[in-house]
Image: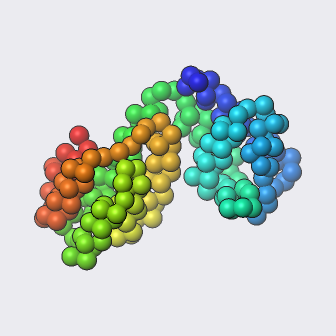
Amino acid sequence: MAQEQRGKVYEGVLQQLKSYIEEHRLKPGDKLPSERELSEQLNVGRSSIREAFRAMELLGLIETRRGEGTYMRAYRPYHMVELLSNFLLNESRTKSELMTAKQMIEKEVLLLLNGSLARQDMSALKSIISGHSNTQRHQKVFEYLFSLCDQPLLLSMWQFISGFTHTFHDVSYSDEWYEELVSVMEEEEDTMKIIRLFQ
């Protein structure tokens, strides 16, 4: 599906969800229709509904409870419709912009921690790297690093952007990249080596 068409599908799904929430006066804790029900109502594929739900969940608007369904957490229509349909899901430039933003935040957390990790921190980092592969490894590595630097806002931004990045990019790094990451983090502060990791 072309990017423009895809954006229109998202926008239609999100607008319909907005209308449903307002018409039924849903509040936090209330249940939303299932993917199947919304797919039939909107005449769009269930995958489009699923991705719209994922976008809303990343924004903290809904939560998915395994085996139960999808429930309201908060409702901010401006964020849901305007932010998603007019920016995050708009135009091909979004792909590169999301990746750039993700890497900027990852660089920042490395700069914050560079030269300050204790021996046990480095040991835990190496265990995470050796215990996971591909996209999951990258996610786990940076979740751990964020937990060490106590930057909840940066973490939320990174999680939000990462969720959309994986929709457009097959994000993976080589074993050598992680070896270099460990090497950089074991050394004293070196801003340029961190920056080169993402070039």
Examine the rendering and report whether any part of residue 33 can be seen: yes
Quadrant, the C terminus: top left
Q: Report the residue that reaches farthest toward the right.
A: 24
Of 121 and 134, the residue lying toward us: 134
Numbered circles on residues, count: 0
Q: Tell me where residue 183 appears, x and y as whole percent.
A: 16, 59
Residue shown at the point (39%, 43%) measured from the top left:
171
Left or right of residue 188, residue 195 in this image: right
Of 82 and 61, the residue lying toward us: 61
Residue shown at the point (44%, 28%) measured from the top left:
93
Q: Tell me where residue 140 appears, x and y as whole percent.
A: 40, 60
Does residue 59 lie above or below 165 as drawn? below
Does residue 115 lie above or below 154 as drawn? below
Q: Tell me where residue 152 appears, x and y as whole percent.
A: 45, 64
Q: Which quarter of the figure has residue 64?
A: bottom right
Residue shown at the point (79%, 34%) measured from the top left:
42
Examine the rendering and report whether any part of residue 82 can be seen: no
Coloration mode: rainbow
Q: Which quarter of the figure has residue 172?
A: top left
Of 91 and 172, the residue lying toward us: 172
Does residue 114 lie above or below 16 as drawn? below
Q: Which quarter of the figure has residue 90?
A: top right
Q: Tell me where residue 168 appears, x and y as whole percent.
A: 47, 36
Of 9 and 66, the residue lying toward us: 66
Quadrant, the N terminus: top right
Left or right of residue 188, residue 123 in this image: right
Residue shown at the point (43%, 38%) measured from the top left:
169
